Image (cartoon, coloured by chain):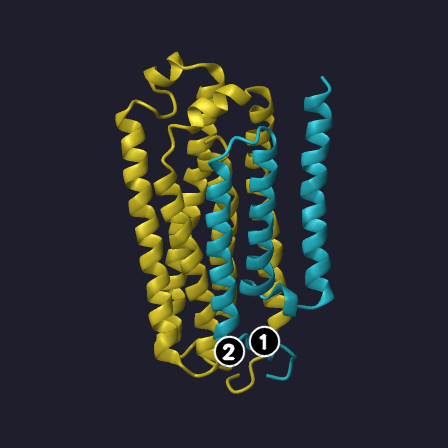
Chain colours: A cyan, B yellow
Amino acid sequence: MTEEHSHIVPYKTFLIIWFALLILTGITIAVAQYNLGALNIWVALGIATLKAGLVVSVFMHMQYESYLFKLSLLSALAILAIFIGFTFFDVLYR
Amino acid sequence: MSGHVHKDYTGAKFGMWLFLFTEILLFGGLFILYSVYLSRYPQEFISAGKELNVWFGGGNTLVLLTSSLFVAVSITALRRGAKRLCLGLLGGTIVCAVIFMVNKYFEWSAKIDHGIYPGSAHLKEMLPGEMVFFNIYYLTTGLHGIHVVIGALILAWTMALVKSDKVNANDWVILENAGLYWHLVDLIWIFIFPLYYLILH
């Protein structure tokens, strides 16, 4: 192996992330028991995004990848955001 | 021919990521469908969402998060030369996939027994928003379920490659890419769970 992809993530890091994911799942279930109106969906989405961030950056090794990977992920997410945003410009203001 | 085979690790991984982006946009479309109808029928989404069992959804969340941990650790294990551990973890991941699908089977069976499935007479009597909720629910979780099955098959194939040392501590990109696919399955469930099972309780 001549290329640089030698970063081996230790077991402990994965276990910590897994534990954090379980805690966040617990929090999202607990918050859902209270009626906060429209806030519920934003809290749920916020926690889900945080969990997704942990999975992508550590489990999927994104934090150890080059800028090529990071930028392309960002552009894919930007396209998704445009997709969602423009749909709602239409739907909300009809 | 043998001896020095050129392997482009970055290229292989980047290709996998490009594929995952298309998957993200595919499921993104389904989430847009969900959010547009949620904004149109908020009350009906609440009443329909209460029909879903948090225990099935929550249990499957634990199963998938744990399976993701197994896959992630299996890569480290293989690279450190712990082939046995790697195979055990991959086997554990496939067991998790099976548990997930068995849960799904019971969950869907209970719904179908209550007459809730796309095109059913009972569904047609429901309010339009409730009907839409269940249709999108079946479409999204069904497509996700297909991904779970495909992911498990890919991991089983990878396991065979690890067993025969075709995937090893010096050449593990197939395991890495199979793992990426599996994490995507987990990633999508991370959004399905709160949106369908929790938001409206």
Which numbered marker is on residue B171? 2
Question: Which chain is home to disc 1?
Answer: B
Relative to A69, is B121 on the left or the right?
Answer: left
Which quadrant of the rendered structure holds the C terminus of chain A? top right
x, y percentage for residue A61? 59, 66
x, y percentage for residue B189? 47, 46
**Residue B192 visible in the snapshot:** no
Classed neighbour count for the residue bearing mark 2: other residues with Cα under 10 Å, few (<14), some (14–19), many (≥20)? some
x, y percentage for residue B125? 38, 12
Nearer-N-terminus badge (1/2): 1
Residue type at numbered disc 1:
Lys
Residue type at numbered disc 2:
Asp
Q: Is B73 drawn above or below residue B143 in the view shown?
A: below
Relative to B198, is A1 on the left or the right?
Answer: right
**Residue B74 visible in the snapshot:** yes
Question: Which chain is home to disc 2?
Answer: B
